[in-house]
Image (cartoon, rainbow, N blue to C red):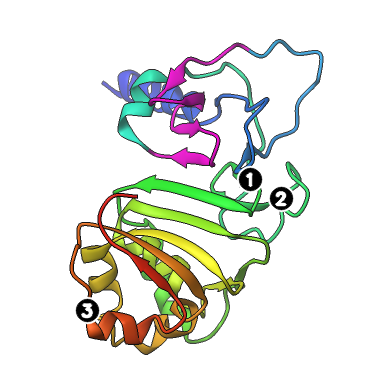
Amino acid sequence: MHRSILFILCLAIIHLNHACYITNCPIGGKRNLHFDNNLHNHQCPRCGLNGQCFGPSICCTGLACRIGNPSDIRQCSLEDRNVIPCEIKTTICSALPNGRCAANGVCCGIEELSLVNYKPQNRKQSYESNSNNQTLSLIEYLFLTKLYISDVHDDYIEQFLFHTKTYLQNNIIVYVDYESLQRVTHNFTRDSTRTNCAKISKLHFWGQEKPSNSLEEYFPYAKICYGLY
């Protein structure tokens, strides 16, 4: 019994230390890693309609890299290579000029970012317990122009809209689910999300077709688009 448990643990450790190399991800992200250019990089299969899979949960399109889509996970293969990934709270990662770590092991160019993840953040509770003490560094997206967060857990919307967690530049375009945004902003009354919401110049909604007065007041500089985008 003990040998079986030890064997399973060893397999788990090996699995966590392997990942797929990203070699030609378009604007939106590359995997932050150190590797020998002479190593052979296997071609990963396509994912989604127009995407190219670069890892077990990373699908890159012409817009950005999508992280964590379950359908992408099933289509992607695991590379037999060891990598040294960046960490989520790292301010700068080396894979791209001005790149920042968008998720563990994923360094994204910060002009456009697309995220797909329906699971809550594992370390949200510890983050919130330290937020009042400002022990965690503010993540700055100085060049981010488009943010796609329609298919994420509410935790990630909070991550981007809390001005104490994320700095966004003015005139950013955001794609988000209406009901999720309504929950995160406490029906468009929450002070901690008001600062970043005021920086949005265009807001694309999925799941809402009628305008709301409280919504338009909460996003004073945003052109609001309803329905399909």
Locate residue 72 relative to residue 62 in the image: left or right: left
* Residue annotated with mark 2: 93
Which of the two discs, 3 and 1, sits closer to the camera? 3
Locate residue 64 relative to residue 179 in the image: left or right: right
Q: Is residue 64 magenta?
A: yes
The quadrant of the picture occupied by the N terminus is top left
* Residue annotated with mark 1: 107
Do tag 1 and tag 2 residues touch (Cβ < 8 Å)?
A: yes
The magenta stretch spans which residues? Answer: 42-68
Mark 1 crowdedness (10 Å alpha carbons): few <14, some 14-19, many ≥20: many
Secondary structure under badge 2? Answer: loop
Q: CA distance from mark 3 to mark 1?
A: 37 Å
Q: Is residue 122 magenta?
A: no
Q: Residue at x 45, y 27 (%)?
A: 56
Q: Position of residue 162 (x, y in %)?
A: 45, 76
Q: Upstream in the sequence, badge 1 or badge 2?
A: 2
Q: Position of residue 209 (x, y in %)?
A: 19, 63
Amino acid, disc 1: Cys
Secondary structure under badge 3? Answer: loop
Amino acid, disc 3: Ser
**122 or 92, which lies in front?**
92
Classify residue 181 by image quadrant. Answer: bottom left
Locate residue 152 relative to residue 44 in the image: left or right: left
**12 or 138, which lies in front?**
138
Q: CA distance from mark 3 to mark 2?
A: 40 Å
* Residue annotated with mark 3: 212
Locate residue 120 relative to residue 24 in the image: left or right: left
